[in-house]
Image: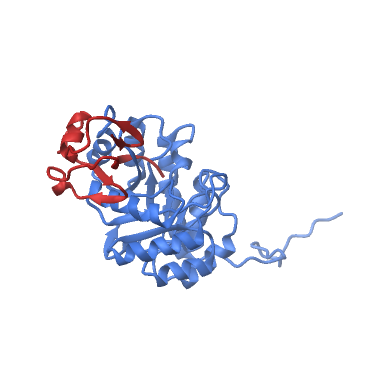
Chain colours: A blue, B red
Amino acid sequence: MTQPLQIAGRELRSRLLLGTGGFARLETLGHAIDACECELVTVAMRRIDPAAQGSLLDVIGSRGVDVLPNTAGCFTARDAVLTAQLAREALQTDWVKLEVIGDERTLLPDAPELLAAAEQLVDDGFVVLPYTNDDPVLARRLEDAGCAAVMPLGSPIGSGMGIANPANIVLIVEAAGVPVILDAGVGTASDATFAMELGCDAVLCASAISRAVDPVAMAHAIRHAVHAGVLARGAGRIARRTHARASSPLRDIAEFAE
Amino acid sequence: MIYVNGQPTAGMENATISELLRGLDIDPETAGIAVAVDAEIARRGAWPTHTLPDGARVEIVTATQGG
């Protein structure tokens, strides 16, 4: 019914990507992956705990989905590049969700470091999907650097504030020659629908699902929401007007005696 | 003395990466782990022969939950 998403020559039937952060239990993560019907799930790279090794990747592998490592926690291009290289070595994938954060309070991207890291990783053969501000100019610069997609935030990571600046998301979508994946800020299903209605190619959710009261139910809801948004975008919404436009005829209205 | 994931670790200088991993009860064949030594990636194929100099700073990482 809808076209598959193409990123760097790979075809993805699902337009929902799932972040694995925030799930209280791995069993719930597994059920949420099933409910999302996603094909890519993000993971972070951290120092190993020898007592805990393997279990996350076992859950992901058992669901038949692929990992998309991120560089969360990196504040510099240097650290992000090294983290991506470690992820490639550990997980046998040259795809990376590039995150270079400017400060801990907002977790907003550090634009100069992000662009520098993107350039280095593209040169090193990575398929780079950068988490970026809702800045159309930076998105264009990242695309020009060779990124395979751009992932603008709707609002800060984990905030659940939805899409704070839809006009900028539209500007990014209109200019982009690579897929636009809305990343961060989704709080509930309607935010995901809105992203797709604005023309985004996909949505990445983590906290909206993992920290919902019922994560698996929210995973179902957001999967349907993404699909609804795709359909609505294709159907073409009506233009906004400042005045009413009657949907019932204004003629031949019965007149009643006083 | 070397430093493994930030922790001072005695007796492992001049060990190979594979020996270090076994010493930490990590099977070097485990999928999903990667090692950096002094901010350079140590390829898995080199672990049996890559010896760790005194003062080496070793990072051993794996995938964990994250958005």
Can residue A1 be spotted in the picture? no
Seen at 16% across and 35% down, the residue is: B19
Give left or right: position of A170 versus A73.
right
Seen at 34% across and 50% down, the residue is: A83
Give left or right: position of A248 versus A149.
right
Q: Residue B7: horizontal and vertical position, in percent? A: 34, 32
Farthest right residue in view: A258
In the picture, the quarter occupied by the N terminus of chain A is bottom left
Residue toward you, A235 or A103: A103
Up the image or down, A175 lies above or below A233; here it is below
Q: Quadrant of residue B21?
A: top left
Seen at 47% across and 66% down, the residue is: A139
Up the image or down, A123 lies above or below B9; here it is below
Can residue A22 be spotted in the picture? yes
In the picture, the quarter occupied by the C terminus of chain A is bottom right
Q: Residue B23: horizontal and vertical position, in percent? A: 19, 29
Residue toward you, A171 or A89: A89
Q: Residue A172: horizontal and vertical position, in percent? A: 50, 67
Give left or right: position of A248 versus A193.
right
